[in-house]
Image (cartoon, helix red, strand yellow):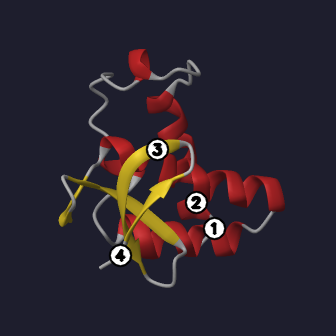
Amino acid sequence: MRCRSFPRIPETPVSVLGFGCMRLPVIGGDMARIDDAAAIPSVFSSYKTGSMFETWKSAAWTYDAFTVQAGHGADRCIECGACEPQCPQGIPIMAKLKEAHSALTQAR
């Protein structure tokens, strides 16, 4: 399987899933080990696509097919809070993950 990098997260190997619609970061180049913490941008990517272009059905399908079905949906967040102090943009990640998951699952 090929690996690529997220443009905004250099040196992060990602698994190429489906037709290139969604790529989830992997740990140590092992395609079977998805990096849940680094998958957060994938959730937000679907959410931003739906809200920016009002393509909620398509964004919801992508989120479900490539993130939720792979076991890495935003609903798996345990709200430990470890991600928020590390966010360089100061995004309230736990609240935004809930918001994204809610919007994307309601759009199906």
Which residue is identified by label 4? 2
Q: Nearer the viewer, residue 96 or 7?
A: 7
> Badge 2, how many Cα within 10 Å: few under 14, some, many 20+?
many
> For the residue labelled by badge 3, is the local secondary structure a helix, a strand or a loop?
strand
In space, the residues marked 2 and 1 are separated at their CA atoms by 7 Å
Identify the residue at horizontal 37%, vertical 44% (top origin): 38
Which residue is identified by label 3? 10
- Nearest to N terminus: mark 2 or mark 4: 4
Q: Quarter of the image containing the C terminus?
A: bottom right
Q: Contact, CB < 8 Å: mark 2 with mark 1?
A: yes
In space, the residues marked 4 and 3 are separated at their CA atoms by 16 Å
In this rendering, is residue 80 above or below 21? above
> For the residue labelled by badge 4, is the local secondary structure a helix, a strand or a loop?
loop
In space, the residues marked 4 and 1 are separated at their CA atoms by 24 Å
At label 4, which amino acid type do we have? Arg
Circle on res. 13? none
- Nearest to N terminus: mark 2 or mark 3: 3
- Nearest to N terminus: mark 1 or mark 3: 3
